[in-house]
């Protein structure tokens, strides 16, 4: 798999941004450690998802491209597929839940995608997508359970560790594409780097799967971190997590909102709740801050209403 990640890094050159790695002296002093933040909120479409989408779609055959691409996503993968489709000149159709953040849906449509909405209380996105795929013969690019998507996401950690050596790497986890790709890349560059996946307490299926070594699910999790509202890990990401990830931890909704507010006020960074999970783990003490800690900030696509709500209830020490 590392060969696929290294190939993806070459493929993404000139297409994805090499996002900045940032530090805060205030944060380092507060935690008593060196914290380096990989700012994927400044990636194209405002999230790391562009990496996996481009790596996967750019490898499709001309015949596959001509039929169009289908994806399902609550937001960031949707935008990523739509943006790649726009850049490569192919049709994209995105299945999105009705409760997806309006900012993400409008951005997806703005990149030229056709958005098909569904009710997550009565339908599954997989079933809706399967019906569309059967009817139109689109090529499906899933959000995480796809080898080329995982490889593309792994370039995030590859870039970070090529720039900065870290003792521990904290990676948000939804379906596990970023977590597993990053773990493989990190272990390649530094076998002693400890990789920890971070989930919301309300969407802890991957953490329970890691602890029990059996695939667990969670139905319609009510977390504010909408990018982690996946029912379970995938057939590819689950075994990769067991093989390459050192630990999993969860954080509360309050901790997530506090981290978003901290990044906003102290570092002037707009980061969505899903993207702030790693920092939430450090600030809340779910993961002890020791040595040099790498944190992947996965995205910055947050509705104004959600950000307003967070800033009203968040607490800053």
Image (cartoon, rainbow, N blue to C red):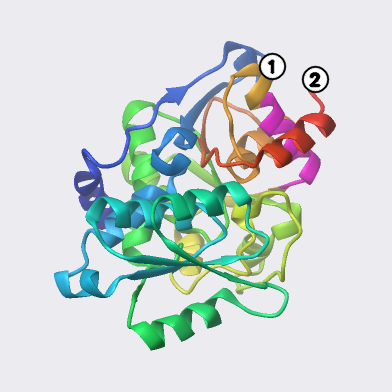
Mark 2 lies on residue? 317
- The Cα–Cα distance between marks 1 and 2, rounded to whole angstroms, is 10 Å
Relative image position of residue 274 (x, y in whole percent): 61, 46
Say whether disc 1 or disc 2 marks the residue closer to the N-terminus: 1
Quadrant in the rendering for residue 157: top left
Vertical arrangement, residue 136 with respect to residue 167, above or below: below
Q: Which residues are magenta?
A: 251-262
Residue appearing at x 44%, y 81% in the figure: 132
- Asked if residue 45 can be seen in this view, the reply is yes
Image mark for residue 30? 1
Residue appearing at x 63%, y 57% in the figure: 100
| 96 in the magenta segment | no
Residue appearing at x 70%, y 59% in the figure: 203
Q: How many residues crowd mark 1 within 10 Å: few (<14), some (14–19), many (20+)?
A: few
Which SS class for mark 1? helix
Left or right? Give the position of 45 relative to 31: left
Q: Nearer the viewer, residue 246 or 282?
A: 282
């Amino acid at each position: 798999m590392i060969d696929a990640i290294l190939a993806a890094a070459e493929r993404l050159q000139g297409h994805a941004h090499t996002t900045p790695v940032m530090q805060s002296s205030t944060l380092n002093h507060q935690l008593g450690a060196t914290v380096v933040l990989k700012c994927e909120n400044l990636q194209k479409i405002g999230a790391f998802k562009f990496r996996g989408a481009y790596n996967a779609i750019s490898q499709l055959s001309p015949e596959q491209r001509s039929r169009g691409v289908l994806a399902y996503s609550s937001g960031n993968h949707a935008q990523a597929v739509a943006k790649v489709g726009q850049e490569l000149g192919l049709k994209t159709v995105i299945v999105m839940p009705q409760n997806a953040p309006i900012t993400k849906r409008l951005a997806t449509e703005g990149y030229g995608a056709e958005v098909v909405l569904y009710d997550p209380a009565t339908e599954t996105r997989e079933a809706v997508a399967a019906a569309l795929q059967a009817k139109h013969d689109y090529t499906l690019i899933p959000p995480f359970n796809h080898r080329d998507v995982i490889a593309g996401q792994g370039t995030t950690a590859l870039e970070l560790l090529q720039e900065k050596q870290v003792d521990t790497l904290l990676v948000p986890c939804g379906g596990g594409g970023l977590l597993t790709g990053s773990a493989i890349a990190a272990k390649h560059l530094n076998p002693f780097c400890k990789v920890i996946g971070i989930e919301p307490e309300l969407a802890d299926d991957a953490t329970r799967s890691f602890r029990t070594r059996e695939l667990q699910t969670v139905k319609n999790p009510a977390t504010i971190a909408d990018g982690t509202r996946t029912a379970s890990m995938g057939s590819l990401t689950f075994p990769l997590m067991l093989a390459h990830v050192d630990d999993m931890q969860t954080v509360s909704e309050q901790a997530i909102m506090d981290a978003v507010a901290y990044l906003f006020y102290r570092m002037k960074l707009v980061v969505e709740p899903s993207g702030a999970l790693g920092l939430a783990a450090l600030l809340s003490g779910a993961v002890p801050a020791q040595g040099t800690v790498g944190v992947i900030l996965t995205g910055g696509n947050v509705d104004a209403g959600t950000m307003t709500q967070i800033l009203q209830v968040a607490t800053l020490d």
